[in-house]
Image (cartoon, rainbow, N blue to C red):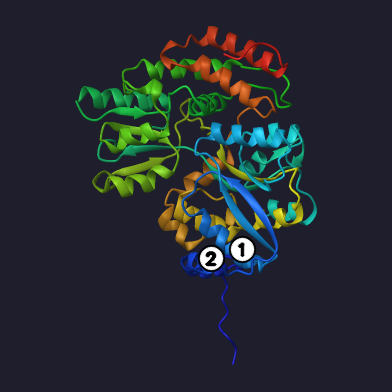
Amino acid sequence: MAQPTDRRPQWRRTAVAFAAAAVAAPLVAACGGGGAGGVTITVYYPPEQHFQNVIDQCNQQAGGAYQIVNLTAPRAADGQREQMVRRLAAGDTSLDILGVDVTWTPEFAGAGWIVPWTGANEAEARKDVLAGPLASATYDGKLYAATKHTNVQLLWYRGDLVSTPPSTWDEMIADAQQLKAQKKPYKIGFTGAQYEGLVVGFNTLTASAGGQLVSDDGTKAVVDDGAVQALAMLKKFATAGVTDAGLSTAAEQETALLMQNGDAAFELNWPYVYAAMQQEKPDLFKNFKWTRYPSMTPGGQSRVTIGGENLAISAYSLHKDEAFKAALCLRSPQMQDYSAVNDGVPPTVASVYDAPDMAKAYPMKDDIKAELATAASRPITPAYQNISTIMQNLLSPPSAIDPQATAAKMKQAIQDALDSKGVLP
């Protein structure tokens, strides 16, 4: 008698088994099981609530060939980078797998701190990965990391206040002003603090206006008319009376709280706010809607800055072969499915978006995929951290921006950074 055929992809069948195994894994680890007789592979990675479950499952799959140990990095991206740079510059051999922000790939690769992926490992790391996330792991034509998860921002809005969401920044500002005149919640949440989040917003506006900040080869400052348009829009937004008084100190969390507290009608933020609103404010959640990030011009399309985390192998690892295998497991399709559902981090593997459990956890997945198809990268250069610091300084506070003058200063300062000249603010 023929056996029933399960037509699901292998990784989906494994994912179902993983859901049960994740529950049992802590008990297995507590009993010293898992056959951990091989080498130890460390992964230096920022806090992610259920990441240890992923590690436990990969250790089981390794069958004792290696044991992955999580070294939790600081929560803030700047702290993560600082710790990694110090240890890698010193040739630290205790780090094997590195969780790297998508903007660090050129810097780490250029310094020789991470090694390129080649052969079968590269083929597996590239398999079915969306183009935007894959580009974030690539530098100078080589793949330097395996994508773990990606991210893009959406426009979140109150469906009980806004019947038709705005498609442009001008419409969004006008809608907020109209709500304000009606004495209804009207504010627009935006990451206006002097930090990387402000650069993300500015980069999105620049790309959406068809502009460019640095040449494709990473050697010349451009800061063209599209960047000037982006600066003008930031200035208009910050002075239109539609923001919170704390705009210049608002990071992601403050932006999310503005909506959760009932003060905002709109919020530009990452998808994690969906689960947070559902958990913290179920009454508001009923009218918590989303749409694609607004464009700069009517009929135009936004190009949203891509974020996320990739896994790279340290050049100083003493166990690179095992580290590559472990990294491939940690970011495999079934692990990305688990992390997306349980930790709210969007997958980089295209087929994961079609998994049945994604429809409930990620009802906005089609909009995320659409934005990823045209996502914009931040300037790709080993000098990015210096360039980011320069832009943060010149963009803050947004209300003080003088579009033409700010653009001129920005272009000169970025060129100085690319030429390793000048003093950082």
Residue 403 image point, x, y percent: 51, 11
Q: Is residue 39 left or right of residue 276?
A: right
Residue at image location 47% in from the left, 45% down from the top: 367
Nearest to the observer: residue 333 or residue 186? 333
Residue ranking furthest to the left: 183
Residue, far bottom: 1
Choose top left, top right, bottom left or bottom right for residue 316: top right
Secondary-structure class at tag 2? helix
Confirm or deny contact between disc 1 and disc 2 (CB under 8 A): yes
Quarter of the view holding residue 413 = top right
195 on left or right of 139: left
Who is closer to the viewer here, 162 or 3?
3
Query: Which amino acid does the dot numbered 1 rest on?
Result: Asn
Q: Is residue 254 above or below residue 321?
A: above
Q: Answer left or right for 38 relative to 21.
A: right
Q: Element type at marker 1?
A: helix
Residue type for callout 2 = Ala
Using a 10 Å C-alpha cutoff, classify the residue at mark 2 as few (fewer than 14 neighbours), some (14 to 19) or many (20 or more): some
Query: Which quadrant of the rendered structure holds the N terminus?
Result: bottom right
Residue at 27% over, 45% down: 281
Residue at which label 1 appears: 59
Per the model, the C-alpha gap separating discs 1 and 2 is 10 Å
In percent of the image, x 32 and y 35: which residue is there?
A: 257
Residues 122 and 177: in front is 122
Residue pointed to by mark 2: 29
Camera-side residue: 365 or 191? 191
| Residue 175 vertical position relative to residue 239 in the rendered view, above or below | below
Foreground mark, 1 or 2, reads: 2
Determine whether 326 is above or below 304 in the image: below
